[in-house]
Amino acid sequence: MAELKYDIIQTIAVLSESPKGWTKELNLISWNGRDPKYDLRDWAPDKMKMGKGVTLTKEELLKLKDSLEEIK
């Protein structure tokens, strides 16, 4: 399996933290040198390990934001 390269450009929000220190974060990340995308996933305290996540374009993130604002 090829090595996955990533660069966290900006941490937008830390949504939660587990007792073991893992955090669920929304970040702007460049994956393998590509244009940055918004990314929601769990991260180990040292940022060397990560859980499965969801990567969104800015347009997808804005649609999600609009949808979440409709929740009562």
Image (cartoon, rainbow, N blue to C red):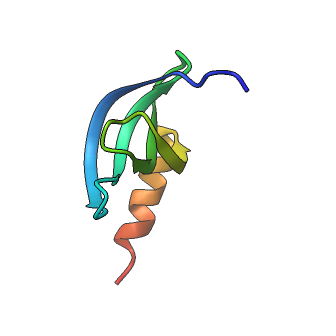
The outermost residue toward the top is 33
Residue toward you, 11 or 64: 11
* Residue 9, horizontal then vertical, whole percent: 33, 26
- In this rendering, the answer to whether 33 lies above or below 62 is above
* Residue 2, horizontal then vertical, whole percent: 69, 22
- Image point 40% across, 61% down: which residue? 66
- In this rendering, the answer to whether 7 lies above or below 71 is above
- In this rendering, the answer to whether 17 lies above or below 48 is below
- Image point 44% across, 40% down: which residue? 38
The quadrant in which the C terminus is found is bottom left
- Image point 31% across, 63% down: which residue? 18
Horizontal side of 5 relative to 65 (left or right) equals right
* Residue 61, horizontal then vertical, whole percent: 45, 49
- Image point 46% across, 58% down: which residue? 64
Horizontal side of 53 relative to 22 (left or right) equals right
Horizontal side of 55 relative to 2 (left or right) equals left
* Residue 23, horizontal then vertical, whole percent: 32, 53
Residue toward you, 27 or 4: 4
Residue toward you, 65 or 35: 35
The quadrant in which the N terminus is found is top right
The outermost residue toward the right is 1
